[in-house]
Amino acid sequence: GFPTASVSRRKLAQCMVRDCMAAREDRENWIPKAVFSSNGQGIALAGQDPAFADAMAAADIIHADGMPVVFASRRTAHPLPERICTTDFFHDAAQAASEHKLRFFILGAKEEQNRAVVEAIRKLYPDVEIVGRHHGYFPPEDDKRVCDLVRASGADVLWVALGKPRQEFWSIRNRENLKGVGWIKTCGGLYSFLTG
Ligand code: UDP
């Protein structure tokens, strides 16, 4: 099975802080951790599409965003303690970011929604520094430009909502261009959740 995050939501947020601090110590060489989530749909997709399975396998951490995945894990040698929804985890991450002064970059969704998400996060978490944002409807030719923007912003955590499977492919393809960013966290439906 895919999920590798045998930790609670709070612990996962602590991992994020630790990795972002390590990234700051070594901005020139640190390759961001790719942190994905897995649900039934994702596992089915990986079964049909070997390229997607490879992208998932290249992740550093995968948390289970679905109870069936958690139940299935209990039949293996690596049972998962809990389901971690990205929409819940975001709040742990934002609290940890407020405490530890981590900087967020918000990538994905249509321009208007992207702007609205940033506003929503600023209202909810005034202490989280959002150092940049970009919509999610750009061609692959623009990957490098977007990555340069992210790096120049000094972001510690890059939130990426480009829909499955594009966000997973994008994250793996671009992580070498994002040195110094602590985490790339895919977050599919999070933005509609925060603005909805
Ligand atoms: N999205 C994007 N670029 C794309 C496709 C999707 O920015 O090329 C955004 C979309 O606007 C939404 C988010 O990705 O905010 C999640 O999309 P969707 O709900 O389709 O994906 P899923 O939740 O199934 O991963």
Image (tube, rainbow, N blue to C red):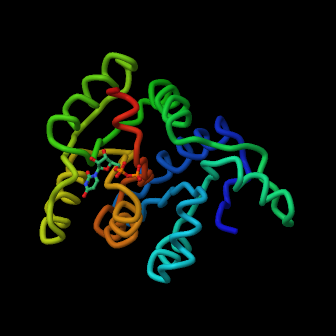
Q: Residue at x 42, y 47 (%)?
A: 187
Name the quadrant of the N terminus.
bottom right
Where is residue 150 drawn, in percent x and y?
A: 24, 51
State the residue lying farthest toward the bottom: 50
Disc tally is 0
Q: Residue at x 55, y 37 (%)?
A: 89
Q: Where 81 sits versus 43, above or below?
A: above
Q: Does residue 81 appear left or right of residue 107 in this picture?
A: right
Where is residue 60 drawn, in percent x and y?
A: 56, 64
Give whichever of 47, 151 is nearer the camera.
Answer: 47
Where is residue 3 drawn, in percent x and y?
A: 66, 60
Q: Residue at x 25, y 37 (%)?
A: 131
Q: Where 109 sits versus 41, above or below?
A: above
Q: Does residue 42 appear left or right of residue 28 in this picture?
A: right
Q: Does residue 5 appear left or right of residue 175 in this picture?
A: right
Q: Does residue 100 appear left or right of residue 158 in this picture?
A: right
Give whichever of 105, 152 is nearer the camera.
Answer: 105
Name the quadrant of the C terminus.
top left
Give whichever of 86, 102 is nearer the camera.
Answer: 86
Quarter of the image for residue 44 reads: bottom right
Where is residue 69 drawn, in percent x and y?
A: 70, 56
Q: Where 99 sits versus 40, above or below?
A: above
Q: Residue at x 18, y 57 (%)?
A: 146
